[in-house]
Amino acid sequence: MRIATHLTERFKMTIGVTPGYGHANEGARGDVVTTVSKAWQEIMEQVGRETGVYVSAVVTSGFVAYECDRGCPEGGEHVGIIQGVRNPEKCTDEKEWRDSLLRIVSEMQERFRQVTAQVVFDNVEMMYLSKK
């Protein structure tokens, strides 16, 4: 087995699935993880074909709680949480990776009709294990 250790970047994105504010999470009916994951995959593959950079991610769901006076549903707004790590074995250029990621984020905002989205970046150590 080959083990490679890299210093790289990780992102975590949070995006609502129901447009606007003052709603009752109507867009969260059904399986939010599958809905968000399918959208990410479609957009990521389109951007990847154009740029050569594919931004893989893990998708989960959760709730963002903010002030009800600002339009947050009681109990929080249902969101998709998307996170991933740049694998230097697949993409050596951090700027190209980040540019592709931000294109995907913008398209996700369009898809879910969101005026805001949140993306956080961290520097991390990653171990890549390969049996090839």
Image: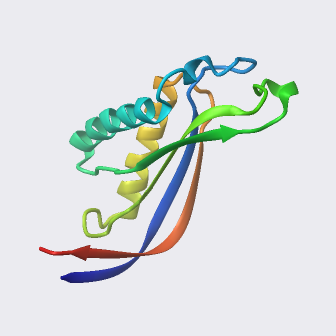
- According to the image, what is the colour scheme of the structure? rainbow
Where residue 5 sits: x, y (%)? 35, 82
Q: Quadrant of residue 7?
A: bottom left
Where residue 19 sits: x, y (%)? 61, 20
Give the side of residue 94 with respect to residue 65, left or right.
Answer: left
Q: Residue furthest right?
A: 69
Which is more toward the observer, 18 or 87? Answer: 18
Give the side of residue 50 with respect to residue 108, left or right.
Answer: left
Quadrant in the picture for the N terminus: bottom left
Q: Residue at x 62, y 27 (%)?
A: 115
Establish if 25 lies above or below 82: above
Q: Residue furthest front?
A: 30
Q: Residue at x 50, y 44 (%)?
A: 60
Where residue 34 sits: x, y (%)? 40, 33
Where residue 81 sits: x, y (%)? 54, 44
Quadrant in the picture for the C terminus: bottom left
Q: Residue at x 59, y 35 (%)?
A: 79
Establish if 98 lies above or below 129: above
